[in-house]
Image (cartoon, rainbow, N blue to C red):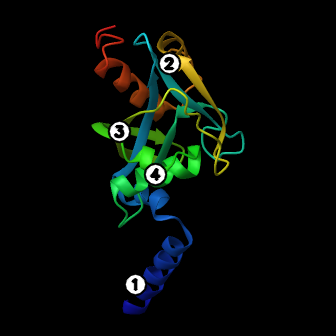
Amino acid sequence: MAATNGVWSEKILHLLRRMNNFYTTGLFGVKRYGVHINGYTVGDSGEVSMWLARRSRTKQTYPGLLDNMAAGGLAAGVGIRHTLIKECQEEACIPSAIAATARPVSTVSYTYEDEEGVFPESQFVFDLQLPADFRPRVGDGEVLEFHLLPIEKVKELLASDDFKPNSAMVVLDFLIRHAFIEPDS
């Protein structure tokens, strides 16, 4: 009996070593965590615009859909603030001095199901007000392009199927917190 358990233990360990721990957590019902950054600008007359990313068409998940300006999963042993700065630099070429000014504002938690299982997740949400003349640039290839959009256009797109689902929830959270929409609408 012990030999059988040892064989299975070795097989499971081998499988886990081959897979990224962020993606294997659902196998064990462990909640996954990430960081999402809402990038926005405020114009001279007070109008707010939001930076959205269009995901690369070669991304394994949700290719070509709209996304937050930067986001990423938390790896074991890596801090939230460190992940925020890393993702800003990698995905949008945002200097660390600017990324470090992001404010923690909320968490968005949800559970979703797909063909691979049921996955509980929580996203640590940050708002990053960017200088009006700043333009994010595509960094690591996970993003196809960036768009600076007025809030009315963001609201219109949010009602479409053009958003990555968890990013849509994070943008909705931004719109409610900044009183661009009412929670009951």
Q: In the rendered structure, which disc, 2 or 4, sits on the residue that comes first in sequence?
A: 4
Say which residue label 4 marks. 96
Q: CB of mark 2 within 8 Å of CB of mark 1?
A: no
Label 1 neighbourhood size at 10 Å, few (<14), some (14-19), many (20+)? few
Q: Which element is circle 4 on?
A: helix
The percent position of residue 116, horizontal first and vertical second, equals 52, 49
**Which disc number belongs to residue 125?**
3
The image quarter containing residue 59 is: top right
- The CA span between labels 1 and 3 is 42 Å
The amino acid at mark 3 is Val
The percent position of residue 89, horizontal first and vertical second, equals 53, 51
**Residue drawn at x 49%, y 71% as measured from the top left:** 16
Q: In the rendered structure, which disc, 1 or 4, sits on the residue that comes first in sequence?
A: 1
**On screen, residue 113 above or below 154:** below
**Which disc number belongs to residue 5?**
1
Q: Nearer the viewer, residue 96 or 55?
A: 96
Dot in front, 2 or 4: 4
Q: CB of mark 1 within 8 Å of CB of mark 3?
A: no
Q: Quadrant of the N terminus?
A: bottom left
- The CA span between labels 1 and 4 is 48 Å
Q: Which element is circle 2 on?
A: helix
Say which residue label 2 marks. 158
- The CA span between labels 2 and 4 is 29 Å
